[in-house]
Image (cartoon, rainbow, N blue to C red):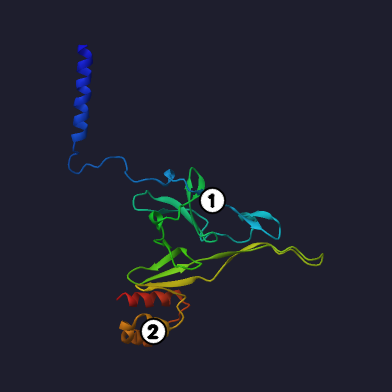
């Protein structure tokens, strides 16, 4: 009985001390409080496309080209409270894939995971609601009160069987489409900005400064570097 009381006292003593213990100044615990993407469910990544002309599912390696912006996985920050993870962007499906136990899964399209920042290139992919058919992931080119985003899209073009013995089959391909640029302002998005007039209408308070800017800079609205220069000026 005496031994039982002593043991109970020691358990209570250590429990109280553990709860009230304060680490010395400068001490950092060896464990990390950051979450891991390994804890996420995520959908399984798909590696095939249904070919209507061939009436079968074609694996990615049976299709000419690639559905990925970059096929390799790269370390990236995926959320504030999560550890960095190896990810890649599937431009065809508009999905971010991550590796778990050597198997690729799809990162949930949620606000929590709406900013993917790659460690090796400083490239950033963001999840945007543009209220059109391109809503999804965009590359952030310029940030700020006015921002510039780029949509990279890859299209699947189905295989075409030969019509006769004199013709040849045409294989299925992944085709890289021209990028689509968006300028985000306080009033919304400008999709595929076309000319100076469109910009001047969006920024009436900067009309004089913009007119001088356009006079000094021959901005081509289909050139990425020119759009970067324009949006950087708008943020001044």
Quarter residue 189 falls in: bottom left
At which x and y percent is residue 47?
A: 58, 52
- State the quadrant of the N terminus: top left
Label 1 vs 2, first from the N-terminus: 1
Q: Is residue 28 left or right of residue 207?
A: left
Q: Is residue 163 left or right of residue 131?
A: right
> Residue reaching furthest top?
1
In this orientation, which residue lies closer to the viewer: 29 or 204?
Answer: 204
At which x and y percent is residue 12?
A: 21, 25
Whether residue 218 is visible, yes or no, is no
Q: Is residue 219 left or right of residue 13?
A: right
Whether residue 61 is visible, yes or no, is yes
Q: Is residue 97 left or right of residue 35?
A: right
Q: How many marks?
A: 2
At which x and y percent is residue 14?
A: 21, 27
Question: Relative to 189, is 66 above or below?
Answer: above
Graded by Cα atoms within 10 Å as few (under 14), some (14 to 19) or many (20 or more), the crowding at tag 1 reads some
Q: CA distance from mark 1 to mark 2?
A: 45 Å
Q: Which mark is residue 217?
A: 2
| Numbered disc 1: secondary structure | loop
Question: Relative to 57, is 3 above or below?
Answer: above
What residue appears at the point 69 percent right and 62 percent down from the top-left corner? 159
What residue appears at the point 33 percent right and 69 percent down from the top-left corner? 144
In this orientation, which residue lies closer to the viewer: 28 or 5?
Answer: 5
Q: Which mark is residue 45?
A: 1
Q: Which mark is residue 233?
A: none
At which x and y percent is residue 68?
A: 53, 59
Quarter residue 182 falls in: bottom left
Graded by Cα atoms within 10 Å as few (under 14), some (14 to 19) or many (20 or more), the crowding at tag 2 reads few
| Numbered disc 2: secondary structure | loop
- State the quadrant of the C terminus: bottom left
């Amino acid at each position: 009985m005496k031994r039982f009381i002593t043991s109970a006292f020691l358990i209570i003593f250590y429990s109280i001390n553990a709860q009230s213990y304060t680490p010395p100044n400068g001490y950092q615990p060896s464990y990390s409080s950051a979450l891991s993407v390994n804890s996420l469910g995520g959908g399984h990544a798909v590696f095939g496309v249904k070919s209507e002309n061939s009436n079968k599912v074609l694996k990615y390696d049976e299709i000419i080209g690639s559905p990925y912006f970059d096929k390799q996985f790269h370390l990236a920050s995926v959320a504030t409270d999560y550890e960095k993870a190896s990810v890649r962007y599937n431009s065809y499906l508009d999905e971010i894939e991550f590796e778990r136990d050597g198997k690729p899964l799809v990162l949930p399209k949620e606000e929590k995971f709406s900013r993917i920042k790659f460690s090796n290139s400083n490239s950033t992919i963001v999840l945007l609601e543009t209220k059109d058919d391109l809503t999804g992931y965009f590359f952030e080119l310029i940030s700020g009160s006015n921002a510039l985003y780029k949509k990279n899209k890859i299209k699947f073009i189905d295989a075409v069987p030969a019509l006769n013995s004199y013709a040849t089959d045409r294989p299925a391909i992944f085709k890289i489409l021209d990028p689509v640029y968006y300028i985000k302002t306080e009033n919304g998005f400008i999709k595929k900005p076309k000319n100076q007039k469109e910009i001047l209408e969006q920024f009436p308070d900067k009309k004089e400064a913009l007119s001088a800017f356009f006079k000094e800079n021959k901005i081509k609205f289909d050139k990425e570097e020119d759009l970067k220069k324009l949006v950087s000026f708008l943020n001044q």
